[in-house]
Structure formats: structure tokens, C-alpha cells
């Protein structure tokens, strides 16, 4: 749902591409300007429009591991282009945006199985820069990503298909420079987030 104009919704499907509604979901039309058919995520960048107006910048990720997974539109979905510089060999799985930055999790499979590589990247929306801020590395991917609304430096990210060591949730309080494990060490707590995770 468009965070600036709630009547607009975009829906990504796994077989029939991208769809759009302009009347709160009462009716839908396929976005014919977007060619890929297998979609992982749709993300609006609310900073690209004022409240009450349609958001102009939208990111959509597809099942593609040839550095053509993440797409960007700057005109509300009329035209689309792959985001330059994105990593290859993996696909964008989830994303979150704040303060002109886009955080994206990547894996070589959408899961829940067959993910043997992955990473977390910080993308400068205006500059086009890409920085690998992965909490760890191994034979697994990354999936969940979230930014705390009260402080854009606080980020949570989760692994995907890390069966042998079990999946992990990581937290960063410095925009991805360093990370703390939350599940494995049973110590994820923050006075800012009031977050408590207890282990069995």
C-alpha cells in the first residue's frame, strides 16, 4: 500500500508479474510496463512524494540472480530499470528504506530451502553506492530486514535456510557497521526498542 496515498496498491505475484490498484483494491490492472513475472517484493520509498500524493519511487525485486533482480521506478511505476551495481549470483529477497538509504537482503534462493549464499547490502538511493554490511557469511542466505522508525541506525536482519546452526536474527545500532546476535546468545535487548527475546 502506498504510504502517501492509501488508495494505491501494488501486488507482486510469482507467475503473473506486477499488478496495481488505484481504488483500495476494488479492481486491479496488470502493470504492463514491468516485464518480469516472478516477484519477491514491492517497496515504496515514502520520501519521494508528499502525503496525499502518489509515491513516485518504487522498488520491486524479482527472481533473477544475474544482477537484474532489483528494479526501480521514479515515476510511480510508469517505467522501470534494474538498479545498477546490485550483487550478482543472488536475488533481492526483502528491503527497507530510511534516510535516503535502502537496505536489501539477498540470497541465491527465495527459500525456505536451497539458499546456499546471501548477503545484506546498504544502497545509497541518490548516490547509487552499494556497501556490503552482512552480519556474517556462510552457506545460507538472508531474508527479513527492518528499520526501527524512531532511529534509522537500528536495523534487524535475519538469516534464511541456515539449518545446521539454526537461523539467526541480528541487530545493528550503527546502520550496519556492526551487529549483535539476538537468538543464539539470548541477549538481544535494547532500552530504545524495549525488545526482549527469551530462549527455551
Image (tube, rainbow, N blue to C red):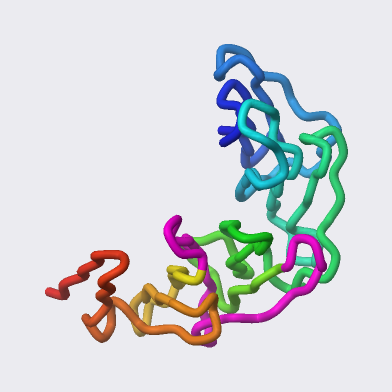
Residue 192 appears left or right of 43 = left
**The N terminus lies in quadrant:** top right
Q: Is residue 5 above or below residue 62?
A: above
**The C terminus lies in quadrant:** bottom left
Q: For this rendering, which residue is in front, 106 or 192?
A: 192
Residue 81 x/y as whole percent: 86, 50
Q: For this rendering, which residue is in front, 186 or 40?
A: 186
Magenta: main secondary structure equals: loop
Residue 196 x/y as whole percent: 20, 69
Residue 138 x/y as whole percent: 52, 87
* Label tally: 0
Q: For this rendering, which residue is in front, 195 or 159?
A: 195
Residue 160 x/y as whole percent: 47, 69
Q: Could you say which quadrant of the image residue 149 lies in? A: bottom left
Q: Is residue 78 part of the magenta span, yes or no?
A: no
Q: Residue at x 84, y 56 (%)?
A: 82
Q: Is residue 131 part of the magenta span, yes or no?
A: yes
Residue 157 visible here? no
Residue 79 visible here? yes
Q: Could you say which quadrant of the image residue 10 lies in? A: top right
Q: Residue at x 23, y 82 (%)?
A: 187
**Bounds of the magenta span?**
124-152
Residue 115 appears left or right of 155 = right
Q: Is residue 19 above or below residue 13?
A: above
Q: Residue at x 77, y 35 (%)?
A: 76
Residue farthest to the left, as pictured: 200
Q: Could you say which quadrant of the image residue 180 lies in? A: bottom left
Amino acid at each position: 500500500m502506498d504510504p502517501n496515498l492509501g488508495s494505491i496498491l501494488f501486488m507482486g505475484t510469482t507467475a503473473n508479474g506486477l499488478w496495481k490498484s488505484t481504488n483500495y483494491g476494488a479492481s486491479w490492472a496488470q502493470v504492463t510496463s514491468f516485464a518480469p513475472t516472478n516477484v519477491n517484493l514491492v517497496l515504496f520509498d515514502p520520501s519521494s512524494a508528499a502525503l496525499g500524493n502518489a509515491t513516485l519511487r518504487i522498488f520491486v525485486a524479482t527472481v533473477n540472480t544475474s544482477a537484474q533482480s532489483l528494479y526501480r521506478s521514479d515515476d510511480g511505476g510508469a517505467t522501470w530499470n534494474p538498479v545498477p551495481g546490485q550483487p550478482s549470483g543472488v536475488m533481492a529477497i526483502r528491503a527497507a528504506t530510511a534516510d535516503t538509504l535502502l537496505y536489501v537482503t539477498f540470497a541465491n534462493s527465495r527459500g525456505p530451502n536451497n539458499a546456499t549464499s546471501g548477503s545484506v547490502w546498504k544502497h545509497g538511493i541518490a548516490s547509487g553506492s552499494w556497501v556490503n554490511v552482512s552480519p556474517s557469511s556462510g552457506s545460507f542466505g538472508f531474508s527479513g530486514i527492518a528499520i526501527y522508525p524512531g532511529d534509522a541506525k537500528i536495523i534487524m536482519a535475519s538469516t534464511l535456510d541456515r539449518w545446521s546452526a539454526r537461523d539467526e536474527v541480528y541487530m545493528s545500532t550503527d546502520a550496519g557497521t556492526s551487529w549483535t546476535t539476538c537468538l543464539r546468545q539470548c541477549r538481544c535487548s535494547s532500552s530504545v526498542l524495549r525488545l526482549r527475546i527469551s530462549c527455551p
